[in-house]
Amino acid sequence: MSLVRAKKHLGQHFLTDKKIAAKIVDGLVHTDQYSQVLEVGPGMGILSDILLERKDLETFMIDIDVESYHFLNDKYPQMGERLINGDFLKMDLKKVFSGKYAIIGNFPYNISSQILFKVLEHRENVVEMVGMFQKEVAERCASKSGTKDYGILSVLIQAYYNIDYLFSVKPGTFNPPPKVNSGVIRLSRNERVTLDCDEKLFWIVVKAGFNQRRKTLRNALSGVLPKVKMDDNIYFEKRAEQLSVEDFITLTQLVTKLAL
């Protein structure tokens, strides 16, 4: 069986360290809440080998790379329709999964943010996600308010998920090695079914606040709520990075009230 050639345009860097692969799979800890897991971008199957040993999990795989798909099809003939050749970002997850499930992967760094937004889009069903990202992205996701790395992704993810930064990975454990360090994080769905505010407006407020992060929210949010409608609430004198998720929820309630 010939090996798959890593393709730069797909952001492929194949993990070669089986111990790290095992640590990533061991990151799935909430398996009492689901029995199905989707691996995104399995490549040559270093995570898949371990996932398929798990009797408590039914593993699905999706890879956009036709060469990887055929390699995996030969390697795991038992997968059948659970091995999908396609684009995860365009995948209709509701057609494949009807209940709760997890997502796992050594994700291509060039689509990290899109993958995370896809997870957020399906937050009602994605109970857990364990993934390898560029270290900078992983740290940004886990950052707390008041830090320079805290941003849009931090707030939106932490609104719906508890996040754990599990461990860092050096470039030399990949073929070909990436130019950056990597980080593995776990997202676990929190208790919030819905936010205590207008959720669409919450996303708009968070994005507007951080798109002009050096400005106070009185200026940054002027496109969402005219300044003449803003009151003297202390939130408007702060910058986005100073607000916690709970603060953003309260701020969204305030914007809704003042917009009337």
Image (cartoon, rainbow, N blue to C red):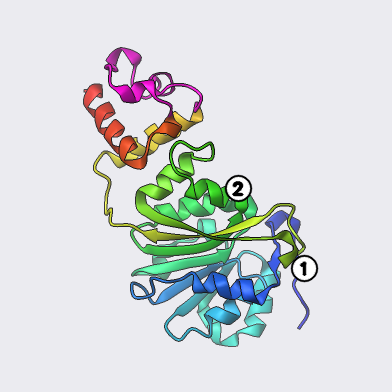
Q: Nearer the viewer, residue 22 or 93?
A: 22
> Which amino acid does the dot numbered 2 rest on?
Glu
User: Which quadrant would residue 133 be assigned to in this image?
Assistant: bottom right
Vertical order, 136 against 101 (above or below): above
Q: Nearer the viewer, residue 179 or 80?
A: 179
In the visual, does 159 lie left or right of 177?
Answer: left
Q: Nearer the viewer, residue 200 or 172?
A: 172
User: Residue at image x 73%, y 56%?
Assistant: 178
For the image, the number of numbered tags is 2
- Asked if residue 115 can be seen in this view, the reply is yes
In the visual, does 149 lie left or right of 188?
Answer: right
Residue 162: percent from left, percent from top: 39, 56
User: Magenta region: which residues?
Assistant: 212-239
Vertical order, 175 against 111 (above or below): below
Residue 212: percent from left, percent from top: 50, 26
Indicate the secondary structure of the residue bearing disc 2: helix
Magenta-drawn stretch, dominant element (helix, strand or loop): loop
The image's mark for residue 142 is none
Q: Is residue 220 magenta?
A: yes
Residue that label 1 marks: 5
Asked if marks 1 and 2 touch (Cβ < 8 Å), the reply is: no
- Asked if residue 61 can be seen in this view, the reply is no
The image's mark for residue 136 is 2
Q: Residue furthest top?
A: 228
Q: Quadrant of the N terminus?
A: bottom right
> Which amino acid does the dot numbered 1 rest on?
Arg
